[in-house]
Amino acid sequence: MYKLIVVGGGPGGVAAGIYAARKKIETLLITETFGGQSIDSSDIHNWIGTKSISGFDFAKMLEEHLRAQDGTIEIVDGERVSRVEKITDGYRVSTESGKSFETKYLLITAGSHRKRLDIPGGKEFDGRGVAYCSICDAPLFGGKVVAVVGGGNSAIEAVIDLLSYATKIYLIHRRDALRADPVSQEKIKSDPKVEFILNSEVQEILGNEDKFVNSLKYKDKVKGEVKELKVDGVFVEIGSDPNTNFLKDLVKVDDSGHIVVDHRTQQTSEPGIWAAGDATDVLYKQNNISAGDAIKAVLNIYDKLTGQNREISKL
Amino acid sequence: MAKVKIYSTPSCVYCRMAREFFEKHGVEYEDHDVAANGEALKEMINKSHQMGVPVIDIDGQIFVGFNRLGLEKVLGIKVA
Protein backbone atom coordinates (compact mmCIF):
# COMPACT_ATOMS: atom_id res chain seq x y z
CA MET A 1 0.00 0.00 0.00
CA TYR A 2 1.30 3.42 -0.99
CA LYS A 3 1.23 6.38 1.35
CA LEU A 4 0.08 8.61 -1.50
CA ILE A 5 -1.31 8.24 -4.99
CA VAL A 6 -1.31 11.31 -7.22
CA VAL A 7 -3.78 11.16 -10.12
CA GLY A 8 -2.73 13.35 -13.06
CA GLY A 9 0.46 14.48 -14.80
CA GLY A 10 -0.14 18.15 -15.53
CA PRO A 11 1.73 20.91 -13.72
CA GLY A 12 -0.19 20.12 -10.50
CA GLY A 13 0.51 16.39 -10.51
CA VAL A 14 4.16 16.81 -11.43
CA ALA A 15 4.73 19.50 -8.78
CA ALA A 16 3.09 17.19 -6.23
CA GLY A 17 5.24 14.25 -7.34
CA ILE A 18 8.46 16.24 -6.99
CA TYR A 19 7.57 17.53 -3.54
CA ALA A 20 6.38 14.10 -2.39
CA ALA A 21 9.61 12.50 -3.64
CA ARG A 22 11.72 15.05 -1.80
CA LYS A 23 9.72 14.39 1.37
CA LYS A 24 10.32 10.65 0.78
CA ILE A 25 6.62 9.89 0.85
CA GLU A 26 6.05 6.49 -0.81
CA THR A 27 4.16 7.79 -3.80
CA LEU A 28 2.68 6.48 -7.03
CA LEU A 29 1.75 8.92 -9.78
CA ILE A 30 -0.79 7.70 -12.36
CA THR A 31 -1.33 9.70 -15.51
CA GLU A 32 -2.48 9.29 -19.07
CA THR A 33 0.00 11.86 -20.39
CA PHE A 34 2.21 14.64 -19.08
CA GLY A 35 1.76 18.37 -19.46
CA GLY A 36 -1.98 18.68 -18.92
CA GLN A 37 -4.15 20.67 -21.28
CA SER A 38 -1.29 23.01 -22.23
CA ILE A 39 0.29 20.24 -24.28
CA ASP A 40 -1.39 21.52 -27.43
CA SER A 41 -0.56 25.14 -26.79
CA SER A 42 1.78 26.49 -29.47
CA ASP A 43 3.50 28.91 -27.15
CA ILE A 44 3.22 29.42 -23.37
CA HIS A 45 4.40 32.84 -22.25
CA ASN A 46 3.40 32.87 -18.61
CA TRP A 47 5.02 29.82 -17.00
CA ILE A 48 7.12 31.65 -14.45
CA GLY A 49 10.86 31.41 -15.10
CA THR A 50 10.39 30.56 -18.78
CA LYS A 51 9.93 33.35 -21.31
CA SER A 52 8.43 31.15 -24.00
CA ILE A 53 7.91 27.42 -24.36
CA SER A 54 5.76 25.22 -26.60
CA GLY A 55 3.21 22.94 -24.94
CA PHE A 56 5.10 19.92 -26.22
CA ASP A 57 8.39 21.05 -24.65
CA PHE A 58 6.55 22.10 -21.50
CA ALA A 59 5.20 18.56 -21.14
CA LYS A 60 8.68 17.10 -21.72
CA MET A 61 10.24 19.46 -19.19
CA LEU A 62 7.70 18.49 -16.52
CA GLU A 63 8.14 14.77 -17.21
CA GLU A 64 11.95 15.01 -17.09
CA HIS A 65 11.88 16.91 -13.81
CA LEU A 66 9.61 14.28 -12.30
CA ARG A 67 11.65 11.33 -13.60
CA ALA A 68 14.82 12.93 -12.18
CA GLN A 69 13.47 12.12 -8.68
CA ASP A 70 15.02 8.69 -9.00
CA GLY A 71 13.85 5.82 -6.90
CA THR A 72 11.59 7.77 -4.59
CA ILE A 73 8.47 7.90 -6.73
CA GLU A 74 6.82 5.33 -8.96
CA ILE A 75 5.15 6.40 -12.18
CA VAL A 76 2.44 4.61 -14.17
CA ASP A 77 1.79 6.51 -17.40
CA GLY A 78 -0.48 5.85 -20.37
CA GLU A 79 -3.23 4.87 -17.93
CA ARG A 80 -6.48 6.64 -17.13
CA VAL A 81 -8.01 6.25 -13.68
CA SER A 82 -11.59 5.02 -13.91
CA ARG A 83 -12.59 4.44 -10.30
CA VAL A 84 -11.75 5.23 -6.70
CA GLU A 85 -13.21 3.16 -3.85
CA LYS A 86 -12.92 3.47 -0.12
CA ILE A 87 -11.28 0.47 1.60
CA THR A 88 -10.14 -0.12 5.19
CA ASP A 89 -7.29 2.34 5.91
CA GLY A 90 -7.42 4.02 2.54
CA TYR A 91 -8.51 3.88 -1.07
CA ARG A 92 -8.32 1.58 -4.06
CA VAL A 93 -7.60 3.29 -7.38
CA SER A 94 -8.44 1.37 -10.57
CA THR A 95 -7.49 2.20 -14.15
CA GLU A 96 -9.38 1.65 -17.39
CA SER A 97 -7.01 -1.15 -18.39
CA GLY A 98 -7.86 -3.06 -15.20
CA LYS A 99 -4.90 -2.33 -12.93
CA SER A 100 -5.54 -1.38 -9.34
CA PHE A 101 -3.46 0.15 -6.56
CA GLU A 102 -4.04 0.85 -2.88
CA THR A 103 -3.10 3.94 -0.96
CA LYS A 104 -3.55 5.64 2.39
CA TYR A 105 -4.01 9.13 0.94
CA LEU A 106 -5.01 10.43 -2.45
CA LEU A 107 -4.31 13.66 -4.32
CA ILE A 108 -6.45 14.40 -7.37
CA THR A 109 -4.83 16.64 -9.99
CA ALA A 110 -6.77 15.18 -12.90
CA GLY A 111 -7.43 18.52 -14.56
CA SER A 112 -10.17 19.09 -17.07
CA HIS A 113 -11.02 18.49 -20.70
CA ARG A 114 -12.34 20.74 -23.44
CA LYS A 115 -16.07 21.29 -23.52
CA ARG A 116 -17.67 19.90 -26.66
CA LEU A 117 -20.01 21.97 -28.78
CA ASP A 118 -23.40 20.69 -27.61
CA ILE A 119 -25.62 22.02 -30.40
CA PRO A 120 -27.18 20.43 -33.50
CA GLY A 121 -24.37 19.36 -35.83
CA GLY A 122 -21.69 19.72 -33.16
CA LYS A 123 -21.23 16.00 -32.69
CA GLU A 124 -22.13 15.02 -36.25
CA PHE A 125 -19.38 17.19 -37.74
CA ASP A 126 -16.76 16.52 -35.05
CA GLY A 127 -13.58 15.89 -37.04
CA ARG A 128 -15.40 16.87 -40.21
CA GLY A 129 -14.78 20.58 -39.90
CA VAL A 130 -15.52 20.92 -36.20
CA ALA A 131 -12.10 20.86 -34.51
CA TYR A 132 -10.73 21.05 -30.99
CA CYS A 133 -6.96 21.18 -31.54
CA SER A 134 -5.96 24.27 -33.51
CA ILE A 135 -2.23 23.55 -33.44
CA CYS A 136 -2.92 20.08 -34.89
CA ASP A 137 -5.60 20.83 -37.43
CA ALA A 138 -5.08 24.48 -38.48
CA PRO A 139 -2.75 23.48 -41.36
CA LEU A 140 -5.66 21.58 -42.96
CA PHE A 141 -7.59 24.83 -43.40
CA GLY A 142 -5.22 26.49 -45.86
CA GLY A 143 -7.18 28.94 -48.05
CA LYS A 144 -10.38 28.27 -46.11
CA VAL A 145 -12.83 30.35 -44.10
CA VAL A 146 -13.15 29.34 -40.46
CA ALA A 147 -14.86 30.35 -37.25
CA VAL A 148 -13.41 30.17 -33.76
CA VAL A 149 -15.99 29.91 -30.99
CA GLY A 150 -15.00 31.30 -27.58
CA GLY A 151 -13.53 34.39 -25.97
CA GLY A 152 -10.75 33.27 -23.65
CA ASN A 153 -7.01 32.90 -24.15
CA SER A 154 -7.43 29.53 -25.87
CA ALA A 155 -9.76 31.07 -28.44
CA ILE A 156 -7.22 33.78 -29.25
CA GLU A 157 -4.52 31.15 -29.50
CA ALA A 158 -6.65 29.22 -31.99
CA VAL A 159 -7.04 32.40 -34.08
CA ILE A 160 -3.27 32.90 -34.01
CA ASP A 161 -2.66 29.26 -35.05
CA LEU A 162 -5.08 29.75 -37.96
CA LEU A 163 -3.70 33.10 -39.16
CA SER A 164 -0.97 31.48 -41.25
CA TYR A 165 -3.46 29.25 -43.10
CA ALA A 166 -7.05 30.48 -43.25
CA THR A 167 -8.09 33.38 -45.47
CA LYS A 168 -10.75 34.61 -43.07
CA ILE A 169 -11.37 33.97 -39.38
CA TYR A 170 -14.55 34.87 -37.54
CA LEU A 171 -14.22 34.98 -33.75
CA ILE A 172 -17.66 34.36 -32.31
CA HIS A 173 -18.20 35.06 -28.62
CA ARG A 174 -21.40 35.13 -26.58
CA ARG A 175 -20.40 38.09 -24.39
CA ASP A 176 -19.87 41.73 -25.33
CA ALA A 177 -16.12 41.55 -24.66
CA LEU A 178 -13.42 38.89 -24.80
CA ARG A 179 -12.06 37.43 -21.58
CA ALA A 180 -8.58 36.78 -22.97
CA ASP A 181 -5.52 38.64 -21.65
CA PRO A 182 -5.25 42.10 -23.25
CA VAL A 183 -1.75 41.23 -24.51
CA SER A 184 -3.19 38.28 -26.47
CA GLN A 185 -6.13 40.29 -27.79
CA GLU A 186 -3.82 42.98 -29.18
CA LYS A 187 -2.04 40.35 -31.30
CA ILE A 188 -5.12 39.73 -33.43
CA LYS A 189 -7.20 42.93 -33.17
CA SER A 190 -5.57 44.75 -36.04
CA ASP A 191 -5.36 41.78 -38.40
CA PRO A 192 -7.64 42.35 -41.41
CA LYS A 193 -8.33 38.60 -41.69
CA VAL A 194 -9.99 38.52 -38.28
CA GLU A 195 -13.57 39.61 -37.75
CA PHE A 196 -15.15 39.76 -34.30
CA ILE A 197 -18.77 38.71 -33.87
CA LEU A 198 -19.66 39.50 -30.26
CA ASN A 199 -22.87 39.03 -28.26
CA SER A 200 -23.58 36.04 -30.43
CA GLU A 201 -24.28 32.39 -29.82
CA VAL A 202 -23.60 29.63 -32.31
CA GLN A 203 -26.78 27.57 -32.65
CA GLU A 204 -26.20 25.02 -35.35
CA ILE A 205 -23.49 23.56 -37.58
CA LEU A 206 -24.50 22.63 -41.11
CA GLY A 207 -22.73 20.57 -43.74
CA ASN A 208 -22.61 19.62 -47.40
CA GLU A 209 -23.61 16.33 -49.04
CA ASP A 210 -20.18 14.86 -48.18
CA LYS A 211 -20.95 15.53 -44.51
CA PHE A 212 -18.32 18.23 -44.05
CA VAL A 213 -19.03 21.62 -42.47
CA ASN A 214 -20.06 24.35 -44.90
CA SER A 215 -21.86 26.85 -42.69
CA LEU A 216 -23.05 27.71 -39.22
CA LYS A 217 -26.01 29.54 -37.76
CA TYR A 218 -25.63 32.01 -34.93
CA LYS A 219 -27.95 34.27 -33.01
CA ASP A 220 -27.09 37.92 -32.64
CA LYS A 221 -28.33 38.42 -29.07
CA VAL A 222 -28.62 42.19 -29.34
CA LYS A 223 -30.70 42.26 -32.51
CA GLY A 224 -32.35 38.92 -31.84
CA GLU A 225 -31.61 37.81 -35.41
CA VAL A 226 -30.37 34.41 -36.55
CA LYS A 227 -27.72 34.63 -39.26
CA GLU A 228 -25.97 32.07 -41.40
CA LEU A 229 -22.26 32.22 -42.04
CA LYS A 230 -20.40 30.26 -44.74
CA VAL A 231 -17.45 28.53 -43.07
CA ASP A 232 -15.37 25.43 -43.82
CA GLY A 233 -14.28 24.89 -40.25
CA VAL A 234 -15.31 25.62 -36.67
CA PHE A 235 -12.66 25.60 -33.94
CA VAL A 236 -14.23 25.23 -30.50
CA GLU A 237 -12.66 26.85 -27.42
CA ILE A 238 -15.60 27.29 -25.05
CA GLY A 239 -13.97 26.28 -21.78
CA SER A 240 -13.57 22.99 -20.00
CA ASP A 241 -15.21 20.37 -17.80
CA PRO A 242 -13.42 18.82 -14.82
CA ASN A 243 -12.20 15.21 -14.95
CA THR A 244 -13.97 14.14 -11.78
CA ASN A 245 -16.51 11.52 -12.84
CA PHE A 246 -14.41 8.70 -11.37
CA LEU A 247 -14.82 9.93 -7.80
CA LYS A 248 -17.92 12.09 -7.75
CA ASP A 249 -19.64 9.83 -5.21
CA LEU A 250 -16.76 10.05 -2.77
CA VAL A 251 -16.11 13.79 -2.50
CA LYS A 252 -18.27 16.87 -2.55
CA VAL A 253 -18.43 18.53 -5.97
CA ASP A 254 -20.12 21.75 -7.04
CA ASP A 255 -22.87 22.06 -9.67
CA SER A 256 -20.37 21.94 -12.51
CA GLY A 257 -18.56 18.86 -11.15
CA HIS A 258 -15.52 20.65 -9.70
CA ILE A 259 -14.20 19.21 -6.42
CA VAL A 260 -14.87 21.51 -3.48
CA VAL A 261 -11.67 22.04 -1.47
CA ASP A 262 -10.53 23.98 1.57
CA HIS A 263 -8.33 26.53 -0.21
CA ARG A 264 -5.83 26.71 2.67
CA THR A 265 -5.01 22.99 2.62
CA GLN A 266 -6.61 21.62 -0.60
CA GLN A 267 -8.42 19.01 1.49
CA THR A 268 -11.72 17.73 0.08
CA SER A 269 -14.85 16.73 2.02
CA GLU A 270 -13.32 13.25 2.35
CA PRO A 271 -10.55 13.31 5.01
CA GLY A 272 -8.05 11.16 3.06
CA ILE A 273 -8.45 12.90 -0.28
CA TRP A 274 -6.92 16.18 -1.43
CA ALA A 275 -7.33 17.88 -4.81
CA ALA A 276 -5.65 20.71 -6.70
CA GLY A 277 -5.75 22.44 -10.06
CA ASP A 278 -8.47 22.63 -12.70
CA ALA A 279 -10.43 19.69 -11.29
CA THR A 280 -11.20 21.77 -8.18
CA ASP A 281 -13.40 24.78 -7.51
CA VAL A 282 -10.34 27.06 -7.68
CA LEU A 283 -11.39 30.38 -9.16
CA TYR A 284 -8.52 30.73 -11.67
CA LYS A 285 -7.43 27.86 -13.90
CA GLN A 286 -3.73 28.44 -14.45
CA ASN A 287 -0.65 26.22 -14.71
CA ASN A 288 1.24 28.18 -12.06
CA ILE A 289 -1.70 28.07 -9.66
CA SER A 290 -2.21 24.33 -10.17
CA ALA A 291 1.44 23.70 -9.33
CA GLY A 292 1.27 25.90 -6.23
CA ASP A 293 -1.98 24.41 -4.99
CA ALA A 294 -0.73 20.85 -5.50
CA ILE A 295 2.40 21.66 -3.49
CA LYS A 296 0.19 23.05 -0.74
CA ALA A 297 -1.69 19.75 -0.75
CA VAL A 298 1.47 17.63 -0.49
CA LEU A 299 2.80 19.73 2.40
CA ASN A 300 -0.52 19.27 4.17
CA ILE A 301 -0.45 15.52 3.47
CA TYR A 302 3.10 15.39 4.84
CA ASP A 303 1.91 17.16 7.98
CA LYS A 304 -0.81 14.53 8.39
CA LEU A 305 1.59 11.62 7.79
CA THR A 306 4.09 12.94 10.32
CA GLY A 307 1.51 13.97 12.89
CA GLN A 308 2.27 17.67 12.58
CA ASN A 309 -1.28 18.84 12.72
CA ARG A 310 -0.90 22.54 12.26
CA GLU A 311 -3.45 24.71 13.89
CA ILE A 312 -5.65 26.24 11.26
CA SER A 313 -7.56 29.15 12.62
CA LYS A 314 -11.18 29.35 11.70
CA LEU A 315 -12.02 32.24 9.45
CA MET B 1 6.84 -6.42 -39.53
CA ALA B 2 3.65 -4.36 -39.58
CA LYS B 3 3.27 -1.68 -42.22
CA VAL B 4 2.76 1.61 -40.40
CA LYS B 5 1.63 4.89 -41.94
CA ILE B 6 1.03 8.13 -40.10
CA TYR B 7 -0.89 11.07 -41.55
CA SER B 8 0.22 14.23 -39.78
CA THR B 9 0.73 17.98 -39.82
CA PRO B 10 4.07 19.57 -38.96
CA SER B 11 2.80 21.39 -35.85
CA CYS B 12 0.66 18.63 -34.35
CA VAL B 13 1.85 17.53 -30.91
CA TYR B 14 0.10 14.18 -30.88
CA CYS B 15 1.76 13.39 -34.23
CA ARG B 16 5.14 14.17 -32.65
CA MET B 17 4.30 11.94 -29.71
CA ALA B 18 3.38 9.12 -32.10
CA ARG B 19 6.58 9.52 -34.14
CA GLU B 20 8.68 9.51 -30.98
CA PHE B 21 6.82 6.42 -29.81
CA PHE B 22 7.60 4.58 -33.09
CA GLU B 23 11.24 5.63 -32.97
CA LYS B 24 11.61 4.57 -29.34
CA HIS B 25 10.34 1.10 -30.18
CA GLY B 26 12.18 0.76 -33.48
CA VAL B 27 8.96 0.70 -35.52
CA GLU B 28 9.48 1.73 -39.14
CA TYR B 29 6.82 4.09 -40.43
CA GLU B 30 5.88 6.25 -43.41
CA ASP B 31 5.03 9.83 -42.53
CA HIS B 32 2.60 11.78 -44.75
CA ASP B 33 2.24 15.51 -44.22
CA VAL B 34 -1.43 16.10 -45.08
CA ALA B 35 -1.05 19.88 -44.92
CA ALA B 36 1.39 19.77 -47.85
CA ASN B 37 0.06 16.74 -49.74
CA GLY B 38 -3.55 16.91 -50.96
CA GLU B 39 -3.54 13.28 -52.14
CA ALA B 40 -2.46 12.08 -48.71
CA LEU B 41 -5.20 14.21 -47.13
CA LYS B 42 -7.82 12.57 -49.36
CA GLU B 43 -6.45 9.14 -48.49
CA MET B 44 -6.58 9.98 -44.79
CA ILE B 45 -10.20 11.19 -44.99
CA ASN B 46 -11.18 8.08 -46.94
CA LYS B 47 -9.63 5.82 -44.34
CA SER B 48 -10.77 7.60 -41.19
CA HIS B 49 -13.90 9.42 -42.41
CA GLN B 50 -12.72 12.57 -40.63
CA MET B 51 -9.97 15.16 -40.94
CA GLY B 52 -8.35 15.43 -37.49
CA VAL B 53 -4.70 14.42 -37.19
CA PRO B 54 -2.92 12.19 -36.49
CA VAL B 55 -4.40 9.20 -38.27
CA ILE B 56 -2.34 6.04 -37.94
CA ASP B 57 -2.78 3.06 -40.25
CA ILE B 58 -1.27 -0.22 -39.05
CA ASP B 59 -1.89 -2.96 -41.62
CA GLY B 60 -5.27 -1.46 -42.37
CA GLN B 61 -6.29 -0.90 -38.76
CA ILE B 62 -7.05 2.81 -38.37
CA PHE B 63 -6.38 4.88 -35.26
CA VAL B 64 -7.52 8.48 -34.94
CA GLY B 65 -5.34 10.33 -32.42
CA PHE B 66 -2.39 8.99 -30.45
CA ASN B 67 -3.57 6.06 -28.35
CA ARG B 68 -0.39 4.60 -26.86
CA LEU B 69 -1.99 1.55 -25.25
CA GLY B 70 -3.86 0.70 -28.45
CA LEU B 71 -0.70 0.97 -30.55
CA GLU B 72 1.28 -1.14 -28.07
CA LYS B 73 -1.36 -3.85 -28.32
CA VAL B 74 -1.52 -3.94 -32.12
CA LEU B 75 2.25 -3.74 -32.55
CA GLY B 76 2.87 -6.34 -29.83
CA ILE B 77 5.08 -4.01 -27.82
CA LYS B 78 5.64 -5.21 -24.26
CA VAL B 79 6.20 -2.50 -21.69
CA ALA B 80 8.04 -3.39 -18.49
Image (cartoon, coloured by chain):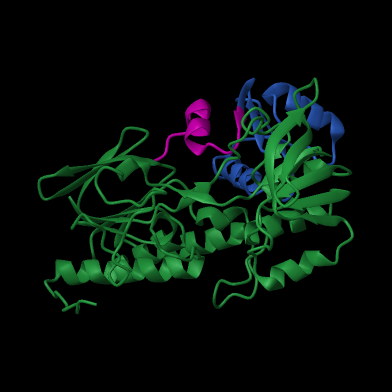
Chain colours: A green, B blue
Q: In the image, is residue A294 above or below residue A309?
A: above
Q: Confirm whether residue A172 shows in the render.
A: yes
| Residue occupying image coordinates x 41% and y 63% | A282
Q: Is residue B11 left or right of residue A314?
A: right
Q: Confirm whether residue A69 shows in the render.
A: no
Q: In this view, does B22 lie to the left or right of A194?
A: left
| Image position, residue A147 (x, y; %) | 76, 46
Q: What stretch is highlighted in magenta?
A: B63-80
Extreme-front residue of the structure: A223
| Residue occupying image coordinates x 89% and y 44% | A143
Instruction: Tell me the quarter of the picture where residue A182 sits.
Output: bottom right
Q: Which of A289 and A222 is in front in this view?
A: A222
Q: Residue B66 magenta-drawn?
A: yes
Instruction: Tell me the quarter of the picture where residue A159 sits.
Output: bottom right
| Image position, residue B75 (x, y; %) | 53, 29
Q: Which of A255 and A37 is in front in this view?
A: A255
| Residue occupying image coordinates x 59% and y 72% | A46
| Residue occupying image coordinates x 48% and y 66% | A284
Q: Nearer the viewer, residue A259 or B27?
A: A259
Q: Is residue A224 left or right of residue B61?
A: right
| Image position, residue A48 (x, y; %) | 54, 76
Q: In the image, is residue A275 above or below residue A93?
A: below
Image quadrant containing the C terminus of chain A: bottom left
| Image position, residue A139 (x, y; %) | 79, 46
How many badges with numbers are in the image?
Answer: 0
Q: In this view, does A27 lie to the left or right of B16?
A: left
